[in-house]
Image (tube, rainbow, N blue to C red):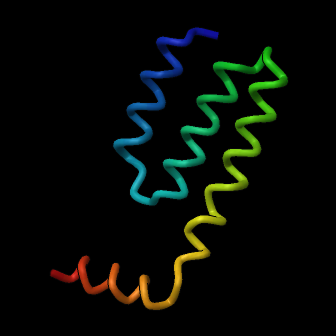
Amino acid sequence: MNRDLDIQKYRNDIFLANKELTKKELFKDLLQKMYAQHSDILELISKMSLGAETTVLNIPRGAKKLIKKQNNL
């Protein structure tokens, strides 16, 4: 594994990605490649990726409207 090449590929792929989910998956893949030999770190990466969606889904309904309104300004 060549870290420099992996990071360069990640940077190129991120610029081409147009969805946040795709960018998240690319970052997760990069971390998994970089820390493949460390099972404790891989476990932490998995836990982080599970928790990321929970925060977004728990936005109160009124806050969603406020965010949408601010984005339209």
Q: Quadrant of the N terminus?
A: top right
Determine the residue located farthest toward the left in the rendered image: 73
Residue 24's place in the image compared with 73, above or below, is above
Residue 73's place in the image compared with 28, above or below, is below
Q: Residue at x 53, y 77 (%)?
A: 59
Q: Nearer the viewer, residue 42 or 17?
A: 42
Q: Residue at x 81, y 34 (%)?
A: 43
- Position of 29 with respect to 46 (left or right) is left
Q: Quadrant of residue 51?
A: bottom right
Q: Residue at x 46, y 27 (%)?
A: 9
Residue 9's place in the image compared with 1, above or below, is below
In the image, residue 15 lies at what x, y percent? 34, 42
Q: Quadrant of residue 26?
A: top right
Q: Residue at x 39, y 57 (%)?
A: 18
In the image, residue 6 lies at what x, y percent? 53, 20
Q: Quadrant of the C terminus?
A: bottom left
Q: Quadrant of residue 36?
A: top right
- Position of 70 with respect to 12 (left or right) is left
